[in-house]
Image (cartoon, grey):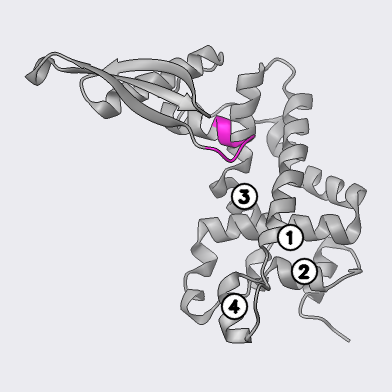
């Protein structure tokens, strides 16, 4: 009997062992209201898929960029595991056509970057459990390998974004900023900002306004990681 996911199986040339995993992988929690179900969604699979993708991307960055230091590798990895990148891969694989969402979400689902990122990761999680480690590893490697092989660090991303993504590539924590000092008055006033990660101060920067001071702090932190500061 044909399955609604048969086109997916044919596209990637595999036979499912547990089709329920793919049902979960493509179901957003908003769909439960329409279906009369509870806790049937992709969130647990997304957790697993995120780790699998991160591991493979880290390995490929390490293998193909032996000249990069740790901080540079983190930033390069972040370029591939950020929301917009994974959403692009989700589209390239044709996964959005299988997504199940609630009626109120249906018109915007295919354009929702966060949702597409989640679906990409949950599908990888389903593959890992259903097809096994070796199949899933090769599948993910084939997705990323050529892009990572020819990739360079994107210097167009602003310092605050690049610093945030460098840390979130490995840990789902945010860097934070705090104004630690102010001096002068009026147009001569200067702000000093410090940037922190997990309570540890990374660097400081100063500027004529709070945003400029935070940007300088991010640039200083990137410099300590041996990274170009960007534009």
Where is residue 38 shown, x and y percent of the image? 65, 77
With 166 as the anchor, is 61 left or right in this view?
Answer: right
- Above or below, 26 against 189 in this view is below
Distance between the alpha carbons at the discs numbered 4 and 1: 17 Å
Can residue 158 be seen here? The reply is no
Distance between the alpha carbons at the discs numbered 2 and 4: 15 Å
With 189 as the anchor, is 141 left or right in this view?
Answer: right
Q: Which mark is residue 23?
A: none
Residue at 85% in and 51% down: 136
With 82 as the anchor, is 179 left or right in this view?
Answer: left
Dividing the image into 4 quarters, which one contains the C terminus? Answer: top left
2 and 1 marks in contact (CB < 8 Å): yes
- Above or below, 169 against 104 in this view is above
Q: Secondary structure at mark 3?
A: helix
What predominant SS class does the magenta segment belong to? Answer: loop
Where is residue 223 shown, x and y percent of the image? 49, 14
Where is residue 203 shown, x and y percent of the image? 44, 16
Can residue 102 be seen here? The reply is yes
Callout 3 environment at 10 Å: few (<14), some (14 to 19), or many (20+)?
Answer: many
Please give the range of residues in magenta: 166-173
Residue indicated by mark 2: 22
Callout 1 environment at 10 Å: few (<14), some (14 to 19), or many (20+)?
Answer: many
N-terminal of the pair, mark 1 or mark 3, is: 3
3 and 4 marks in contact (CB < 8 Å): no
Q: Which mark is residue 123?
A: 1
Q: Is residue 168 magenta?
A: yes
Residue indicated by mark 3: 86
Distance between the alpha carbons at the discs numbered 3 and 2: 18 Å
Residue indicated by mark 4: 31
Distance between the alpha carbons at the discs numbered 1 and 3: 12 Å
Residue at 83% in and 68% down: 9
């Amino acid at each position: 009997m044909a399955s609604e996911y048969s086109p997916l199986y044919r596209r990637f040339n595999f036979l499912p062992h547990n089709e329920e995993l793919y049902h979960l992988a493509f179901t957003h929690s908003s769909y439960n209201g329409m279906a009369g179900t509870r806790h049937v969604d992709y969130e647990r699979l997304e957790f697993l898929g995120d780790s699998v993708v991160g591991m493979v991307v880290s390995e490929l960055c390490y293998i193909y960029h032996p000249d990069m230091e740790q901080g540079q590798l983190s930033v390069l990895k972040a370029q591939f595991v950020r929301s917009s990148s994974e959403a692009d891969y989700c589209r390239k694989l044709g996964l959005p056509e299988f997504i199940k969402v609630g009626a109120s979400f249906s018109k915007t689902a295919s354009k929702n970057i966060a949702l597409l990122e989640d679906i990409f990761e949950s599908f990888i999680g389903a593959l890992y459990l259903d097809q096994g480690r070796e199949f899933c590893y090769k599948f993910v490697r084939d997705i990323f390998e050529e892009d990572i092989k020819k990739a360079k660090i994107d210097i167009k991303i602003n310092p605050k974004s690049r610093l945030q993504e460098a840390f979130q590539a490995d840990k789902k924590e945010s860097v934070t900023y705090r104004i630690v000092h102010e001096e002068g008055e009026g147009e001569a006033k200067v702000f000093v900002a410090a940037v922190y990660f997990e309570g540890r101060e990374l660097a400081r920067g100063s500027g004529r306004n709070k945003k400029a001071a935070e940007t300088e702090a991010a640039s200083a932190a990137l410099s300590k990681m041996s990274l170009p500061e960007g534009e």
